[in-house]
Amino acid sequence: MKIVLMKAAMLWCSKVWRDNMKIHFPILYKGACLLSLFILLSACSAKKRTAENPIPLQMQDQYLRDLEETLLAVERMKLTDNADSLRLIFLEARLKFKQTEPIMAFFKASAYKALNQPNLMIVHEGGNGIENEPPQGFQVVEELLAEDSLDMKVIHAEIANIYTTLQLEKDNVNVAVSSDYHFLWLVRDSFVRIMALGISGFDSPVLHHSLPENRQVLLSIKGYLQLNKTRFQDSKLYEQWIDELERGAQSLNHQDFDTFDRYSFIKNHIHPLLNLWKRTASDWNVSFPFDTKINYEAETFFDSATFNIAKFAPSYSPKSSPEIVSLGEQLFFDKSLSGSKTMSCATCHQPEKYFTDGLSKSRANDGNTLPRNSPTLLYAALQNNQFYDARVANLENQIMDVVNSEKEFHSDLTRLQETVESSDAYKAEFKTLYKDSVTSRNIRNAIAQYIRTLMPFNSKFDRNISNKENSLTVSEINGFNLFMGKAGCGTCHFAPVFNGTVPPSFSHTELEVLGVPQSAVFTNATIDQDSGRYTLFQADLKKFAFKTPTVRNVSRTAPYMHNGVYTTLEEVVKFYNVGGGSGIGIALHNQTLPPDSLGLSDQEISDIIRFMQSLEDNLEVSPSLISYGSD
């Protein structure tokens, strides 16, 4: 690439070209010469970086080799019409593709997503109307290959799309100018992806080829780490990396997807690798240019210190402080903020009920019911959208929606500000804590800052998988393994938050069409008439779509579903076990939940429930306010 740039610059500055341009197009001549100088300097700068640090160039060479191997496997798929051969070559191609994953998913996220997206129609909602974009990539081919009768024309068209995307990526690789912090970021992203998506079968939903594929990812990271061997000041740290990556890869040699011990894999392999990652950042003396949603000091993915909650707040939000949180807490419980002076945030989000109200459908300010119930605010900050229909992007906007709602606060932002300004105590606090004192935005931000502290991560499960204690029962561990494996719960409720916000970027929260009934019957059911996300944009494929909530503290937040139709976890798991709405007589063309039965036994259902109960946080509740007790 640098040679091409150099030649282009030389050509543009040739004497014949220069003389003609200077005479006929003097302005273009000056601009073109400046461009050629920039190209020359850029090429020289890249050359200097490569000369001083050849590791990124070696990484790029390795990535190109992995891409070439993937292309060769996909090309073999293009050349066969034999079903059995096609399926075997597909598995080989997936393994080769997984070798590219650490680099591609980080540097070319759009290409990676195009190649590895779920086989679901992508719905674009907005000002330009509704656009449905067909999915593409390996998961589409996987499901086509699983059919009894193969449509070779369709399959080969999808394979051609994969090949074109890979070839385009190969022709536009630019990894050689990366830095140490890029490499560390992509490695940590890989660990999150393996833990949350890989071992759950998220990207191999039919063949469940996930274990060997993620073994390939760990071995790929090992290969890239070996290229970085000279970066280690502590040679023992490097040796520990190689040993741990090999041990983790070896554990993924397990042959049965359903019986793989995911709990032990995360606890005994992923978390030790995360610890090595943290030590390596120090050993390499890496300075990160900005914060990410996962803290650099994190040694476990299941701890209150894991997430950098400020990165989930809007850009205008000031840095959190105990004083702002305390102010937000006061406002959260203040009924004077509502139009009737009878309702506060805590009316529908009661701490003693784990920040729900325990109702099937919440009460409006006039005593009548609202269309839906109040989901817990615990971990609400760790999602990209708020409300069941995901209609707003952050907590500040959620509060605005509640303030303006005729059936809730029945007020407006001007009255909200006037109410707070009428209090000398509030005015003094805002003047101290916010540059522009009392504004409606600052009021909402203060409340949101308090809500963002409601993520304790101190459940029995968290303490155990983070190696702080050893008290989980065999049933609870088996329940987690089923949740993340055979039952498929973890493909929508992503670890570690167990909600629908997709790791490792945590920038998109998914909605699902489950087929929730209007009453708790399991035969000849009728769909609940709340159309969910459809209400906002009238996208047909989003009819009855609702945001995937967290299952943390689910043992304390009954009733379940947006309409509170189920009162027990046994009912909820039974609903999923029979295939959602499809299994209870509700036919929806857009159901995103797989309609097939999960085939869970009574014992397996019991184990999954025991696991979910182990996600209950330890909260100490006072009559009006809440604080988190120490373990």
Image: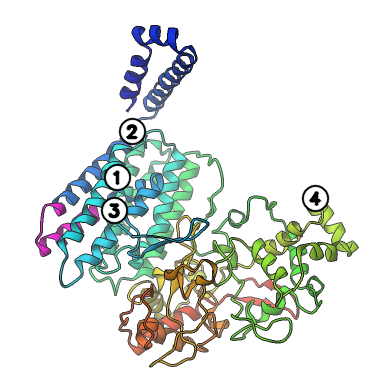
For numbered disc 4, what is the local secondary structure? Answer: loop
Q: Position of residue 92 (x, y in %)?
A: 19, 56
Viewer-closest of 550 and 455:
550
Viewer-closest of 199 and 530:
530
Q: CA distance from mark 3 to mark 2?
A: 20 Å
Magenta region: 77-98
Q: Amino acid at mark 2?
A: Leu
Q: CA distance from mark 4 to mark 2?
A: 49 Å
Q: Position of residue 38 (x, y in %)?
A: 45, 21
The disc, 1 or 3, on the residue closer to the chain's N-terminal end is 3
Q: Residue at x 54, y 83 (%)?
A: 563
The disc, 3 or 2, on the residue closer to the chain's N-terminal end is 2
Using a 10 Å C-alpha cutoff, classify the residue at mark 4 as few (fewer than 14 neighbours), some (14 to 19) or many (20 or more): few
Residue 622 image label: none
For numbered disc 1, what is the local secondary structure? Answer: helix
Q: Nearer the viewer, mark 3 or mark 4?
A: 4
Residue 436 image label: 4
Q: Amino acid at mark 1?
A: Gly
Residue marked by disc 2: 57
